């Protein structure tokens, strides 16, 4: 039994109609095994990883060419290669359920504009964009980057790029210029995609100057395409979609090797520039099929929604619902405009079946005492997904008390590193308060102590012990995999340490307590500390700084910034305002700390590393002696302030 309160159990009908249950029976029959429940099926999937991943190609009827005799070359992470003799295309498989008259996308803008687009409309626009890419002489492996909203045109451009074997990379328009340059400059894109403006929080933000600066700074860019709908206001930077040639041939697909790069996502930049995380056509294809089928239970003709921007991996994940024959709802704007409960209103109006959001959004609704159950018809809603940061027990309770009492709540966690979830939903299992339901199929995830020993029902590091196809093929400009190894394999040789602090419960659920490393997690969005420090370098009064994010038990977050100032300088309101303005301008509002505090010194190790993680642990109330070894510190007395400050906030 779980220690958490039982909140939901699947009916026998739900279980029997689920893709997951059908797959369990299929495995038992085909391979003569006795997987009697989900845990036994999970165990089979990791004990027989090559059979499992190979078999999914048949189960999902994926389109490919080549032979599958060689499934996995190399055994030790990260030196391995999946399906070296298979060629395929992600976009070809993503659109295989397309029918001309069926709805592919329902697009909603903050301005109130709502429009449905058929597959014929979507693929026609994608084909026209593809023709333009061809006219520009782009070849498979060339990079296409964009600063784009979550709009129909963006989805079409992505399909055009992926179908052509080009490599996609995107930031949302609210990213600061330096943040965008930090990312795109690494991959030397040839094409820049953009729009004139975007709406957020009831305001219109003009992007002409930003686009002008970005095109000038991205020296590798030779062509630009304006994806603004209608007649663009500013057409002096490139051509617009109104000028595209029409295609009568439809979208064409170039099959590439299973491990060919599909898109580049970016880490938060905790150490140095954000890592350019590169995923493969085949790895993403297998993983998103698996997750949407077995862990989201998405069915044909359903409507799948996840609130996201194009700068978050959930935008990429959202489009995976097409693999199940579903339509997707995309929304561009503030989730809380004009009212906090706007997304629930939208879900009711569009009859959403699967509603995805972040833990902070659920908690914001709770704090505002929003009652969607009383105000909206959510009878079509089958599941609510939550990710971005751990959903606390209070969030679970709120969903069942105020949103829908018979809903399947699927808290999940994974990230940009794999563009999926390692742990998440399991429709054949009950939902318990505060617990993620399961470890995903094919994911050999365990809780380890510092010495690499497995822990049962104790807190420790989240570690994946076997390779998965969705793991990055490499980081861009990291040919020797130096940063790759440092990011995941430095603590445990050959084992992927994800940086989450977890506990696997006695009933095989998972509880995540927050980050075990220094990555910041503000409002569900991960932020690299190095971005903060680079921005603060522009403030001459600051000698040094340290920032951490504290995850509280009630789901709240506290992100204090500690600054060491030049001698004689006092931290006043004017300087605080300048610091906040600098961070907002260089990066985003999410980079602005909750509090700015002046300190006499910043703690460092003898090797010269800022002690972000130890300070975070101290401020979370853990015993100092378990967080810090004074003998390894360059300035041990600097810790005293943080010890006292921890007493104030705990």
Image (cartoon, rainbow, N blue to C red):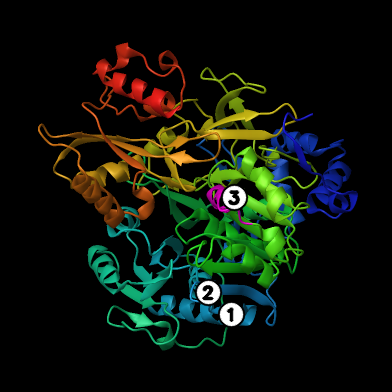
Q: Are marks 3 and 1 in contact (CB under 8 Å)?
A: no
Q: Which residue is mark 1?
A: 115
> Closer to the observer: label 3 or label 2?
3
Q: Nearer the viewer, residue 82 or 603?
A: 603
Q: CA distance from mark 1 to mark 2?
A: 9 Å
Query: Residue 568: percent from the left, percent from the top?
Result: 10, 33
Q: Residues within 10 Å of mark 1 (few under 14, many from 20)?
A: few
- Residue 318: image location, x then y, percent: 59, 60
Q: Which residues are magenta?
A: 359-370
Query: In the rendered structure, which disc, 3 or 1, sits on the residue that comes first in sequence?
Result: 1
Residue at the (59%, 50%) spot, across then down: 366
Decide which of 432, 126 is in the foreground and name it: 432
Q: Residues within 10 Å of mark 2 (few under 14, many from 20)?
A: many
Please state the horizontal and vertical placement of residue 40, each as a whole percent of the image.
Answer: 79, 34
In this view, the mark in front (1 or 2): 1
Q: In the drawing, what numbered circle is on residue 366?
A: 3
Q: What secondary structure do most residues of the magenta stretch adopt?
A: helix
Q: Nearer the viewer, residue 476 or 74?
A: 476
């Amino acid at each position: 039994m779980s220690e958490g309160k039982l909140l939901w159990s699947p009916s026998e009908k739900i279980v029997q109609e689920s893709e997951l249950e059908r797959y369990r029976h299929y495995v038992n029959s085909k391979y003569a095994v006795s997987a009697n429940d989900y845990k036994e099926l999970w165990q089979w999937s990791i004990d027989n990883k090559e059979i499992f991943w190979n078999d999914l190609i048949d189960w999902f009827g994926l389109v490919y060419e080549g032979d599958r005799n060689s499934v996995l070359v190399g055994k030790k992470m990260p030196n391995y290669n999946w399906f070296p003799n298979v060629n395929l295309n992600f976009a070809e498989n993503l659109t295989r359920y397309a029918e001309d008259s069926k709805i592919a996308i329902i697009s909603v803008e903050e301005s109130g504009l709502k429009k449905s687009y058929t597959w014929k409309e979507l693929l026609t626009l994608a084909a026209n964009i593809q023709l333009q890419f061809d006219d520009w002489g782009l070849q498979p492996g060339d990079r296409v980057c964009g600063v784009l909203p979550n709009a129909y045109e963006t989805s079409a451009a992505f399909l055009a790029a992926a179908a052509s074997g080009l490599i996609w990379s995107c930031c949302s328009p609210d990213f600061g210029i330096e943040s965008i340059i930090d990312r795109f400059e690494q991959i030397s894109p040839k094409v820049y995609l953009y729009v004139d403006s975007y709406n957020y929080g009831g305001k219109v933000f003009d992007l002409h100057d930003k686009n002008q600066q970005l095109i000038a700074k991205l020296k590798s860019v030779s062509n630009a395409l304006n994806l603004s709908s209608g007649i663009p206001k500013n057409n002096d930077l490139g051509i617009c979609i109104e000028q595209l040639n029409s295609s009568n041939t439809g979208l064409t697909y170039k099959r590439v090797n299973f491990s060919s790069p599909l898109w580049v996502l970016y880490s938060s930049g905790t150490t140095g520039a954000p890592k350019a995380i590169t995923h493969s056509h085949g790895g993403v294809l297998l993983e998103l099929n698996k997750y949407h089928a077995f862990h989201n239970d998405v069915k044909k003709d359903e409507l799948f929604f996840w609130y996201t921007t194009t700068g978050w991996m959930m935008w990429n994940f959202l489009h995976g619902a097409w693999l199940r024959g579903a339509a997707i709802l995309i929304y561009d704007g503030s989730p809380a405009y004009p009212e906090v409960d706007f997304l629930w209103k939208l879900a009711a109006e569009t009859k959403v079946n699967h509603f995805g959001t972040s833990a902070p959004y659920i908690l914001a609704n709770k704090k505002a005492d929003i009652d969607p159950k009383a105000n909206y018809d959510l009878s079509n809603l089958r599941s609510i997904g939550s990710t971005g940061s751990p959903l606390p027990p209070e969030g679970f309770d709120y969903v069942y008390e105020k949103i829908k009492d018979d809903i399947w709540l699927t808290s999940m966690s994974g990230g940009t590193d794999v563009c999926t979830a390692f742990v998440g939903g399991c429709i054949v299992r009950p939902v318990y308060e505060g617990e993620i339901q399961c470890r995903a199929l094919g994911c050999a995830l365990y809780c380890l102590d510092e010495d690499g020993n497995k822990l049962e029902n104790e807190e420790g590091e989240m570690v994946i012990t076997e390779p998965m196809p969705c793991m990055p093929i490499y980081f861009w400009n990291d040919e020797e995999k130096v940063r790759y190894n440092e990011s995941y394999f430095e603590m445990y040789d050959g084992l992927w340490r994800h940086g989450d602090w977890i506990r696997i419960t006695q009933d095989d659920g998972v509880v995540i307590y927050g980050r075990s490393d220094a990555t910041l997690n503000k409002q569900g969005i991960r932020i690299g500390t190095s971005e903060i420090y680079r921005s603060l370098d522009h403030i001459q009064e600051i000698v040094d700084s340290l920032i951490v994010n504290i995850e509280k038990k009630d789901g709240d977050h506290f992100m204090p910034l500690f600054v060491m100032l030049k001698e004689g300088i006092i931290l006043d309101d004017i300087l605080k305002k300048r610091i906040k303005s600098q961070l907002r301008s260089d990066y985003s509002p999410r980079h602005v700390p909750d509090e700015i505090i002046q300190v006499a010194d910043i703690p460092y190790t003898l090797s010269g590393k800022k002690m972000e993680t130890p300070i975070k642990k101290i401020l979370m109330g853990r015993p100092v002696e378990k967080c810090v070894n004074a003998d390894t510190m360059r300035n041990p007395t600097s810790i005293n302030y943080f010890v006292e400050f921890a007493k104030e906030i705990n």
